[in-house]
Amino acid sequence: MYNLHGRWLRRLSIIIVIIFACLIFVKRDVILDKVFNQFGQTSAAPTAKNVSNQSKDLVAKDYTGTQTFPVENNQPDFNQPDLDTKNGSWLNLSRRDWLGRPQQANAMLNHSQMPTEKRTRLTVKTPGYHIYHFNQNGQSNYLYNRSHLIGYQLAGLNNDARNLITGTIALNATHQFDQQPSMEDYENAIASYLRKSNHHFVRYRVTPLYRNVERVPRGVEMEAQSISDDSIKFHIYIFNSQPGWQINYYTGMALQQN
């Protein structure tokens, strides 16, 4: 009787541990938000160390007023198989990492993927997302958007946590007060090209880049190449920064500078 009772206790303990582990995994975004917010109250952000490869070289750069700059002379780094259209249009989103952070998104874009319905309200809470309002030249803005890696207008993806990062308005949206390009400007150019013909294809890759275990990306690397011509061809890096704001990339907390 004792052995039977002991076996049931062990089984129950294992079941409880498994359930607890599953709950932690499912709720890891909420848990990590609390942990990072508790131990990262300062608005100062750490610098990158031990940088070697190209992605780390990019993420090590600090914003100095220029939002966007070309990478590898603006030449996308696709090989010939990457540009093959034998499988038609497709979309491939990477799994989020253990911190719940979105990773690289790849696509072969075509007009057939573009949405015909208006985008619905976003409900996904991206890592490090907080609400901050500020005024810019008399207009009210949010500091952060929940930014799509593959823009909604290109593929119709909306509330997919693998495709959404916490991005500043300067990263995500067309600039109203200077001529610097944002993600939206490049997405608009691709969308315009795709609408011109059902036979137009664009190979597209978007990579959010993080320093160490920071939850908000320092920037986004974007590459695109139209297949039949060079109408769309770029390889750029856009800083996930906002003029006049100091961002803690661990927590997403921010301070507006005077």
Image (tube, rainbow, N blue to C red):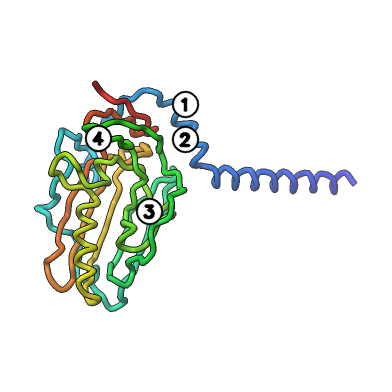
Of badges 1 and 3, nearer the viewer stands 3
Q: Report, in whole angstroms, how far the alpha carbon at label 1 lies from the one at label 4.
A: 24 Å
Percent across and percent down for residue 196 are: 20, 71
Percent across and percent down for residue 256 are: 29, 25
Q: Callout 1: 10 Å neighbours few (<14), some, many (20+)? A: few
Question: According to the image, label 2 marks what residue?
Answer: 33
Helix, strand or loop for disc 3: helix
Quarter occupied by residue 85: bottom left
Sooner in the amino-acid sequence: mark 3 or mark 4: 3
Percent across and percent down for residue 6 are: 81, 44
Question: According to the image, label 4 marks what residue?
Answer: 242
Sooner in the amino-acid sequence: mark 1 or mark 3: 1
Question: According to the image, label 3 marks what residue?
Answer: 163
Q: Report, in whole angstroms, how far the alpha carbon at label 3 lies from the one at label 2.
A: 19 Å
Q: Report, in whole angstroms, how far the alpha carbon at label 1 lies from the one at label 3.
A: 27 Å
Q: Are marks 2 and 4 in contact (CB under 8 Å)?
A: no
Helix, strand or loop for disc 1: helix
Residue found at the far right of this picture? 1
Quarter occupied by residue 250: top left
Question: Against 112, is 241 above or below?
Answer: above
Question: According to the image, label 1 marks what residue?
Answer: 38
**Amino acid under disc 3:** Asn
Q: Report, in whole angstroms, how far the alpha carbon at label 1 lies from the one at label 2.
A: 8 Å
Name the foreground residue: 213 vs 93. Answer: 93
Q: Report, in whole angstroms, how far the alpha carbon at label 3 lies from the one at label 4.
A: 21 Å
Sooner in the amino-acid sequence: mark 3 or mark 2: 2
Question: Against 83, is 55 above or below?
Answer: above
Name the foreground residue: 66 vs 44. Answer: 66
